[in-house]
Each structure stands twice: as structure tokens, then as C-alpha cells.
Image: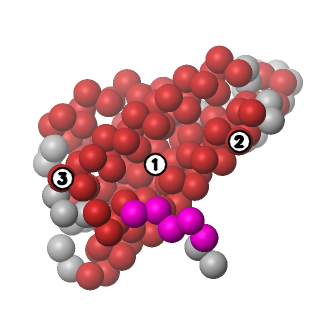
Amino acid sequence: MNGSRKTEARRWFQQAYYDLEACRWNIKGAFFDTACFLAQQAGEKALKSLLYFQGSRKKALLTHSLVEMMREVGKRAASFLDLSEDARRLDLHYIPSRYPNGIPSGYPHQFYSEKTAESAFQSAEAIFDAIRVYLIERGGEEIVRIEENGC
């Protein structure tokens, strides 16, 4: 893997970690809509990290769909296809968790529940953890080492 791809894999993985942590905090604060969006973002960024690591083409990196990214990742690592349902669950939160016109009535904050947010968190965590293990097993320890203070 060339240096720029490794750098990008690391940047995306680091932000995935912090999005997952922010998701956890938003659940504690009862901001369940925001937590669901952050779970989607954590999954998306972790998958993009893996796509960079795998050397995927730019087209595979342009989507926001975890299902599409999971299919691409699965071409080189079939075990990730077991997480397709988690990817599908997270894709459902990309628009409705942020925009009032993404749901039939009301607004996202009143629409989302703790149970929904917990489920989204669990899906994101499963994807994140599987990618972390995969990267470590393939020499990506530097990519997954979390910087406690990015400043």
C-alpha cells in the first residue's frame, strides 16, 4: 500500500472512531436522531478507511451508501458480507435523521427513539470492530491506533 492510501485510511478510521464516541454521547444525552446519523457516519468512515486500505478505485469511495461500500469490500474480504444487514440498517438513517422532510411528519428529534439509536450504535460498532480487527491482522496497527488528542 502506498503512503497516501495509508494516510487516508488512517484519517478516515480516526474520524470513524470519534463519530462512534459522539454517537455514544448523544445517546446518553437523549439526542437519538443525531446519534443515528453519527452511527451512520461512523460506519461510512470506517468502510472508507478499509476501501483506502484495500486500494479501491475512487468511484467506490464516492458513495455514502454503506451497502454499496460493503459490496465493494466484500469482493476482497467475503466475511464482511455478514455485516450487510448492519450496513442496511445504518443506510436508513442517512437522510431522515437530519431533515424534517425525510420523515412523513414532525421532525427527527421527536421521531427517533433510544431503542433505534442503540440499534444503530450496535450496527456501527460491529462494522467498526470488524474493520479494526481486519486491519490489525494485515499490518494496519498504525492505522487503528487512536490519537487521544488530535490537536
Image x and y of residue 56, in percent = 23, 62
Residue, x 63% and y 78% (percent of image)?
Answer: 151
Query: Dot 2, crowdedness within 10 Å: few (<14), some or many (≥20)?
Result: some
Residue 88 is inside the magenta segment: no
Of the numbered discs 2 and 1, the one sitting upstream in the chain is 2
Q: Which residue is mark 3?
A: 137
Quarter of the image where one finds residue 117 = top right
Q: Which residue is mark 1?
A: 44
Of the numbered discs 2 and 3, the one sitting upstream in the chain is 2
Range of the magenta residues?
145-149
Residue, x 51% and y 53% (percent of image)?
Answer: 17
Quarter of the image where one finds residue 35 = top right
The amino acid type, in three-letter code, at marker 2 is Trp
Image x and y of residue 4, in percent = 31, 81
Q: CA distance from mark 2 to mark 1?
A: 19 Å
Q: Nearer the viewer, mark 2 or mark 1?
A: 2
For this view, does 39 lie left or right of residue 52?
right
Residue 95, visible in the rendered structure? no
Residue 138 is labelled as none
Quarter of the image where one finds residue 2 = bottom left
Residue 25 is labelled as 2
Q: Secondary structure at mark 3?
A: helix
The amino acid type, in three-letter code, at marker 3 is Glu
- Relative to the observer, which residue lies in front, 151 or 82? 151
Q: CA distance from mark 2 to mark 3?
A: 30 Å
Where the N terminus falls, by quadrant?
bottom left
For this view, does 3 lie left or right of residue 20?
left
Magenta stretch, main secondary structure class: loop
Of the numbered discs 3 and 1, the one sitting upstream in the chain is 1
Whether residues under marks 2 and 1 lie with C-beta atoms below 8 angstroms apart, the answer is no
